[in-house]
Image: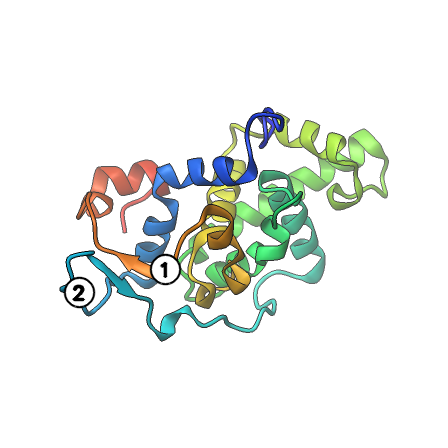
Amino acid sequence: MKNPMPDESTVSRREFVTGLTALGAVWLTAAACAKEAPKAVDSSASGIMPMANDSTSVPQALTHFTAEQAAELEAIASRIIPTDDTPGAKEAGVVYFIDQAMQTGGVAADQGPLFAAGLESLAKAAAKQHGATSKFSTLSAEQQDTLLKAIEKTPFFGAMRFATIAGFLALPKYGGNKDFVGWKVIGQEHTYEQKPPFGWYDQPDNQKALLGRVL
């Protein structure tokens, strides 16, 4: 796994996370979670409309994962988007976004077995390399990065990386981006944006490339 901040002397957290949005994660997440577009379109020349009441945060509570599993997921997410001079995945409550998505009827409920198996495999690797009582969440950042680098090409890590980015940038009503901390990091205003590429994320090939499946 590449260092999330490859050169902290030249790359800021804002630049890093803003770069991630080039994948369209924030917009694709809105489609994947809500499967709906804003019902109204601003007719102003700016093409920007205010955010409606769906920006409200939901109570952050676990409904799918156990507290132990959630601690491990949070530790992984915190290496993907770490906390430094700006909030990271932990402060954004990314783990609650993932938990809500995985619950029965959630948009990513089908990925439950993948995440369960991935966590189990990572736990075994941590115990094997650092002692039977070791957990990924209790290891040093360097030790955690070494373990994650070994699985960076796996479906689990790919799904975890996407879920972390999505949870950092999605509307708070989906469980993450608490108090819009993710948007504050990248300078995103609390508005819908009506601008090109219209319909790009609706194309099956593009959805499959980003999500691994067609919505």
- Image coords of residue 55 (percent x, y): 41, 69
Q: Earlier in the sequence, mark 1 or mark 2?
A: 1
Is 70 situated left or right of 103 in this image?
right
Amino acid identity at mark 2: Val
Observer able to see residue 68: yes
* Residue under the point 71% across and 34% down: 144
State which quarter of the image contains the N terminus: top right
Residue sitting nearer the eye, 117 or 164: 164
Q: Which residue is mark 2?
A: 41
* Residue under the point 72% across and 57% down: 68
Q: Which mark is residue 163?
A: none
- Image coords of residue 61 (percent x, y): 60, 70
Q: Against 181, is 202 above or below?
A: above
The crowding category of the residue bearing disc 2, from other C-alpha atoms within 10 Å (few below 14, some 14 to 19, many at least 20), is some
Observer able to see residue 167: no
Residue sitting nearer the eye, 66 or 92: 92
Amino acid identity at mark 1: Cys
* Residue under the point 66% across and 61% down: 66
Q: Which residue is mark 1?
A: 33
Residue sitting nearer the eye, 210 or 44: 44
Q: Secondary structure at mark 1?
A: helix
* Residue under the point 61% across and 60% down: 65
